[in-house]
Image: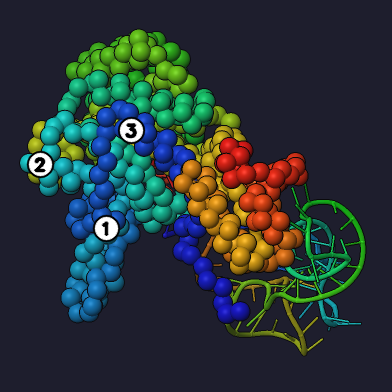
Amino acid sequence: MAQKPSIPKGTRDFNPEQVAKRNYIFNTIRGAFETFGFQPIETPSFENSETLMGKYGDEGDRLIFKILNSGDFLGKANEEAYEAKDSLKLTPSISEKALRYDLTVPFARYVVQHQNEIEFPFKRYQIQPVWRADRPQKGRFREFYQCDADVVGSDSLWQEVEFIQLYDAVFSALKLEGVTIKINNRKILSGIAEVIGAHDKLIDFTVALDKLDKIGEEKVKEEMRSKGIPEEGIEKLQPLFSLSGAFETQIEVLKSILSTSEEGMKGIEELAFIDNAISELGLQTAALQLDVTLARGLNYYTGAIFEVAAPDSVKMGSIGGGGRYDDLTGIFGLKNVSGVGISFGLDRIYLVLEELNKFPETVTKNVEVLFINFGDKEALFSLKAIKTLRENGINAELYPDAAKMKKQMNHANKRAIPYVVLVGESEMTSNTFTLKTMKTGEQHTLTLEDLIAHI
RNA sequence: GUGGUUGUAGCUCAGUUGGUUAGAGCGCCUGAUUGUGGUUCAGGAGGUCGUCGGUUCGAGACCGAUCUUCCACCCCA
């Protein structure tokens, strides 16, 4: 054999069972999205580079897959950058398109582009693959699916409340118990930064704070110092490091820290509103938890920030995330359209369900009956019966070749087909069918009518 | 992008300080059994040891590069 073919790093093939399991998740999520009133859209796999570049921070730009221009791309390359081997500068001159990095930014582009056709508030969902030039790890791929639901054109906090219910609905439907929906608010982070005199260092400050549960208090303080956050400010943070427990108690502590920050107090108010509503409405299986160290997607989130953590027993990064972005469409020239949305990480949810054995046994839609092929005459007779079975909604098929019985039975066995029908000469003359139940080995000779009733 | 790790049959893995013809279990194919699968028995196929190069009389093993896997950073679903 020649060299074995392969697929690029971080991509995967899916076999029939895997596809069935993935579809089970897709269908569950899609069903919930539609129950909550979201409508589907799709956008292209690749966008103009300028649509994506600069929207996810420097780190994000690095992870965007760029598509090389067609034709004589070197002829139009930026010569100065080429000579200087300056890849960063050279890229825009040889690549004008890039693969979608997430679904949120293309959606913002969509909203701006179609603003006159859209009825606001617009609730859309989108289930499509995205690509990141990241280094693969467990639960981290270079091609993976995101399932996004967003609302644009309403700044009502009821949307946040509904999204928490939506998360809960999906994970409950998937029988994935013990999921934690973490929530925070950009205004609180901003308020804290203001109070400690690091307003201009918001990102540095939050990136450091985000690592609290991973590297510990001292290391976080160290990182903050190295980023130039004043010592007195870090001292003011002290109550934050031990902050935990019930939503309300955390809110009280935050109030004392943020009393002088108007923005911070606004954030607290928002969180309290959401928490009150959820307490009233109740959640099925998920838990809502306030986590002030949560700091994701700060390049565009302006209000609520969400992140969903898998049950503690599995070691997996977040399986969902989202938040409120007041000005996402602003970067494309449409002001004053607030949006909020969440995302489900399909591939990670898959891994979690697999690890916890939460897939129902019936996900694979299998053939129910296999007709044994004894020859052309019998095959034709069988196909007539199969036609009727199919019309009755029964998945049935004929073994295509008049192979040895053993081979045909084996085939049924390996594909886990529950029933086999044998039609030979004697059955044909009496117009009956011998139905064999593979699991028990039992056999009955039946009329076509009884056969349909039996399966 | 930085540092580390992994790769031997379809799958899971052995393979001694470098030494004849690279093994096992499971799976696969054929037969025992021409209208009966799963169990059993007998036989069989299947490997450029990830790839390329180097050291050596000799490399699956040692060295280098590269690809891949997983892990820690970074970041994230």
Whole-number angstrom distance, CA of label 1 to CA of label 3: 25 Å
| Residue A149, quarter of the rendered image | top left
| Image mark for residue A127 | none
Q: Secondary structure at mark 3?
A: helix
Q: Is residue A169 above or below residue A12?
A: above
Amino acid at circle 3:
Phe
Q: Earlier in the sequence, mark 1 or mark 3?
A: 3
Amino acid at circle 1:
Phe
Frontmost residue, A242 versus A401: A401
Q: Residue at x 37, y 44 (%)?
A: A146
| Image mark for residue A46 | 1
Discs 1/3, front:
3
Whole-number angstrom distance, CA of label 1 to CA of label 2: 23 Å
Whole-number angstrom distance, CA of label 2 to CA of label 3: 22 Å
The location of residue A102, given as percent across then percent down, is 31, 47
Discs 1/2, front:
2
Frontmost residue, A33 versus A396: A396
Residue A321 showing in the rendered view: no
Q: Quadrant of the C terminus of chain A?
A: top right
Q: Residue at x 30, y 17 (%)?
A: A274
Frontmost residue, A301 versus A9: A9
Q: Secondary structure at mark 1?
A: strand
